[in-house]
Image (cartoon, helix red, strand yellow):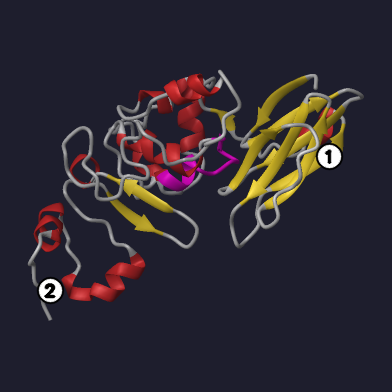
Amino acid sequence: MVRIHRVGKRIVLELDGDLFLVIHLMVAGRLKWLDRGAKVPGKVGLAAIDFPYGTLILTEAATKKRASLHFVRGMDAVRAMDRGGIEVLDAPLAAFRQALLRENHTLKRSLTDPRLFSGVGNAYSDEILHAPACPGADHAQAFRGGDRAAPPRDAGGAPGVDRAPARRDRRGFPEKVTAFREGMAVHGRYRKPCPVCGTAVQRIAYADNETNYCPRCQTEGRILSDRSLSRLLKSDWPGTSTSWRRSSQPGAETRR
């Protein structure tokens, strides 16, 4: 092993002989470091890579397998996997703003588009949007006129984001890597209190992931429509966080 680095969300293991292992964990992929010669787990194991000092196991506990492992030669082959997004923590503010306004997407979609921003992902886009109280459903073009401030480009600036887990993981191999972690402000905290105002965090559920947000901090108290749940509830859909609190109380009746 020569070094380890990153291309977007892909982990790059650089080996001798200009060879590279490029790993994309997707949502459910995990890496485990075990004693050399360890067997690949039956149902969730995808691959085992033996090193002189141990074995790296790639697993994915999901019905639909999406994690990937590429073995390539030459840095050009690695660069070809780069989707082209800017590195958020390194980019100047002007470059961040230019990338944000490049497409007519919602803020959430723009921040998670690897062609615009490298490696942000679903979890940290929720945290980035919570810090300046921006609704993820707003379109990026709303910031073009200059009347509204763009979201901060540093996910670490969000009040609930704790970088300590990453620092602690450096003491040993990080076994429990997940987007749902203690210290997040809104992501993975559905119905839990917002650390800023105490309002219950809400979500919009999609087929493969979800968006989490604070209605009081980010949407002026509005509960954004969740397609599946709002279709089920129809006229009973709570339009505001106040209505949600009343409908969630024990003994609350549902209108028919």
Cα–Cα span, label 1 and label 2 = 56 Å
Is residue 247 depicted above or below 111 in this figure?
Answer: below
**Furthest-bottom residue in this view:** 256
Is residue 239 depicted above or below 20 in this figure?
Answer: below
Q: Which residue is drawn at 60% across and 41% down?
A: 115
Q: Which amino acid does label 2 sit on?
A: Thr
Give me the disc on residue 254: 2
Q: Which residue is drawn at 47% across and 36% down?
A: 100
Residue 145 image position (x, y, % from top left): 34, 35
Q: Which amino acid does label 1 sit on?
A: Phe
Residue in the foreground of this view, choosing between 84 and 33:
33
**Residue span colored magenta:** 108-119
Callout 2: helix, strand or loop?
Answer: loop
Say few, some or many: other residues with alpha carbon within 10 Å of mark 1 (under 14 / 14 to 19 / 20 or more).
Answer: few
Say few, some or many: other residues with alpha carbon within 10 Å of mark 2 (under 14 / 14 to 19 / 20 or more).
Answer: few
Callout 1: helix, strand or loop?
Answer: strand
Snapshot quadrant of residue 72:
top right
Residue 220 image position (x, y, % from top left): 17, 46
Residue 231 image position (x, y, % from top left): 30, 74
Q: Please give the residue where the numbered disc 1 appears in the rendered image.
A: 71
**Furthest-right residue in this view:** 17
Q: In this image, 222 relative to 96: left or right? A: left
User: Where the C terminus falls, by quadrant?
Assistant: bottom left
Residue in the foreground of this view, choosing between 65 and 10:
65
Residue 194 image position (x, y, % from top left): 23, 39
Residue 239: in magenta span: no
User: Where the N terminus falls, by quadrant?
Assistant: top right
Q: How many labels does the image show?
A: 2
Residue in the foreground of this view, choosing between 182 and 5:
182
